[in-house]
Amino acid sequence: MIKSLSPLIISGREVLPLVEGGKGIAVSNGESSGSWAAAGGVGTFSAVNADAHDENGQLIPIVYHGKTRRERHDELIEFSIQGGITQARIAHEASNGQGRIHMNVLWEMGAVEPILHGVLSKSKGMVHGVTCGAGMPYKLAEICAHYGVYYYPIVSSARAFRILWKRAYNRFSDWLGGVVYEDPWLAGGHNGISNSEDPLKPEPPKERVIALREAMNEYGLNNTPIFMAGGVWALSEWEDWLDDPRIGPIAFQFGTRPLLTKESPISKEWKQKLLTLKEGDIYLNRFSPTGFYSSAVRNDFLDELQARADHQVAYSISAVGDHVAPFPVGARGRLVYLTPHDKEQAESWVAEGHTSAMRTPDSTLIFVKPEKENEILTDQINCMGCLSACAFSNWAQNEEGTTGKKADPRSFCIQKTLQEISHTGDVNNQLMFAGHQAYRFAKDPFYANGFIPTVKQLVERLQTGL
């Protein structure tokens, strides 16, 4: 037991300062979060396209029937609300009245506001807090206060919190349960690296958290806890943070380690893959249609996206400057102009079978095989508006239903791949988000010989500092 690991008041109850991080699309569900709460901590289920069950407890397949994006978007909202309510009920029952249950959403997910209203209005007493990141969730406070639920914005800097506080949160301070600092270089999934920060030059989190606490103290939030998220594996490595007056009340959020538990809903193939990762297998990339950097396991899925980016040349619609070499594009052979060097490179890719040249919003061409072009175009056509704005399909949550930009074939349908990895064992050809500490499963003696603990066993282990 860590000497200084004291309970905190979180969402109105004294609990262990151990928080399960929410992971989207059926990865953190009611069973895992309810079990975490039952162990005395804070469990977090994801309401990002959560799984819904029928009256017999069977998974309801997500099948879209709408012929337009807008129609499919409306279906997605209904699926999401139904799934969020389902997981809230499962978590509530699994918690046995212990701990706290939080719900995680992304502000940049499609229709986040109606989904929040839909789930919270029908889960009274089952959800005690809402964590929300991926954007600037100004309206989060107002929505949560309306339902008497605590809110927990996810930020990666003191500056981001100041903006949120001054614009919106100062009016709903009673329901601010805590602030989640998610380290942009260490966390899994999407990361909040700003344009002024270098993704290859991580900054130590402690000074950034101290700066966040200083900002919070300016607003009288001295006793409001901070959740440290990203890169947290063993609390013995963070013991100097405990009882540090510069940091104040602190809880620790675990996103990666709860993946490898009996209650975790991910496939056995995914769990086995986690046990084999090596340092360097997880890396930051910017292929996501959200525009954010994200942290994921290098596999065939990411390698193919990298190949698209590598098979890329700039073009001009007319001969200008160095772009003087004509090159035919598409079935009609419309001419664009490349540099002589790029034309030679493009012809070599075509000779290798990458015969389809697809235009990007940045006046470049990427070269892919015809079957990949068909897949990309089909996925773009089948868009259901799962994001507030999507670079891949050019969907946007506005009256026009579009970003006004050309769809970007260098990205991918994030809804499709996350549904696939969540519900199948395909860990090589789908996006596999992971925190940068995931390689430690293979080294940690707790997981020796393929041992997979229950959530209760994991929480007990964490309390020892290991």
Image (spheres, rainbow, N blue to C red):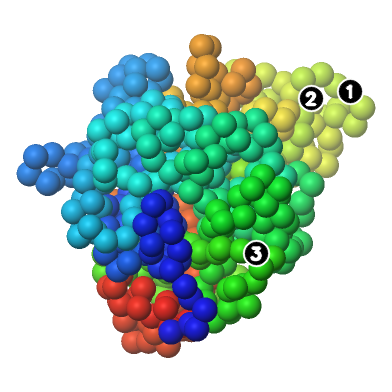
What distance separates the C-alpha of mark 3 from that of mark 1?
Answer: 57 Å
Q: Along the line of sight, which residue is nearer the eye, 200 or 112?
A: 112
Q: Amino acid at mark 1?
A: Val
Q: Secondary structure at mark 1?
A: loop
- Residue denoted by label 2: 316
Instruction: Report x, y in % for residue 447.
Output: 38, 82
Residue farthest right in this picture? 321
Q: Which x, y percent locates residue 250?
A: 55, 64
Residue topped by disc 3:
247
Q: Residues within 10 Å of mark 3 (few under 14, many from 20)?
A: many
For this rendering, which residue is in front, 151 or 69?
151
The circle on residue 320 is 1
Q: Say which element carries label 2.
A: loop
The one of 217 and 169 positioned closer to us in this rendering: 217
Label 2 and label 3: CA atoms lie apart by 54 Å
Q: Secondary structure at mark 3?
A: loop
Any part of residue 332 in sight: yes
Q: Residue furthest top?
A: 399
Disc 3 marks a residue whose amino acid type is Ile
The residue depicted at 12 percent of the width and 46 percent of the height is 57
Amino acid bearing label 2: Ser
| First of labels 2, 3 by sequence position | 3
Q: Is residue 106 left or right of residue 283?
A: left
Mark 2 and mark 3 in contact? Answer it, CB < 8 Å. Answer: no
Count of number-bearing discs: 3
Query: What is the residue that sits farthest to the front in this orientation?
Result: 220
Check if mark 2's residue and mark 1's residue have beta carbons within 8 Å. yes
